Image: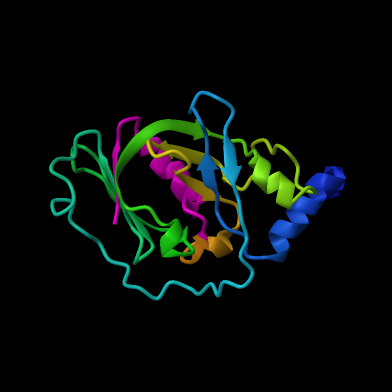
Amino acid sequence: MTKSRFLTPSRRAFVAGSLATLSTPAIAQTSSVNSQSTTEVERDVTEVVRRNISSFRTLDWQPYFSSLKNGAVLVDIDSRAVHYWSEDEAIYKLYPSSVPVSEELTRRGRTKVIQKVEGPSWRPTPSMLKRNPEWPPYIGPGPDNPLGTHALYLSWTYYRIHGTHDTRKIGRRSSNGCIGLYNEHISELFGMAKVGTQVLLI
């Protein structure tokens, strides 16, 4: 017996809708990181989403950061890659990622990790519930959650680096602003990054 038999009708509709289309990773929305958070999840079925064909290469940190204090994360939107360097330079990681579907939804610049959440919950915004009344108002941690297993909240409101249970998203322009990683990769990055880790999106 699969888990889907135990889902409520609204949760079944949400999960079925998620699997039926190439849904986007979330733009996390929160008015305060300590309050109940919401997540903007949109789908654009008219958007042609293609696999990443950009170069996927290692980079040096020096052109992007003045130091590695607290470690550093570089998100390269064009190559759809996330780079991580530890403060002592002993660790360098390179991960494939999902990126925003359009330039309008893309934010670039310097930010930092302000909160780490293992097992993030998901709440659609009021506007999302208005457009999609069949969606549940809340999904807790687990395989149905659009944010995957871990999330790094950034200092920019609504932006996170998070996991995804839908592996089709990785390497694609498939999000509404957030950066998505495979769950095993966000778990690893989550363990290395800390509150205060500097983040640059280019």
State the residue lying farthest toward the top.
34
Q: Is residue 71 above or below residue 173?
A: above
Q: How many marks?
A: 0
Q: Position of residue 35 (x, y in %)?
A: 55, 24
Q: Is residue 81 above or below residue 120?
A: below
Left or right placement of residue 182 versus residue 21 in this view: left
Which residue occupies 25% across, 61% down?
58
Which residue occupies 68% across, 65% down?
21
Q: Is residue 144 visible?
A: no
Q: Is residue 113 above or below residue 76?
A: above
Which residue occupies 86% across, 49% down?
1
Left or right placement of residue 16 versus residue 23 in this view: right
In this figure, which colouring scheme has been used for the structure? Answer: rainbow
Q: Position of residue 98 (x, y in %)?
A: 47, 59
Residue 183: say if magenta: yes
Q: Position of residue 39 (x, y in %)?
A: 58, 42
Depth check, front residue: 182 or 195: 195
Left or right placement of residue 59 versus residue 6 in this view: left
Q: Is residue 129 visible?
A: yes
Q: Position of residue 201 (x, y in %)?
A: 31, 52
Among the 4 quarters of the image, the one containing residue 47 = bottom right
Depth check, front residue: 7 or 88: 7
- Write the start and end of the magenta stretch as one range: 175-202
Residue 142: say if magenta: no
Q: Is residue 138 above or below residue 78?
A: above
Look at the image and tell me in which quarter the C terminus lies: bottom left
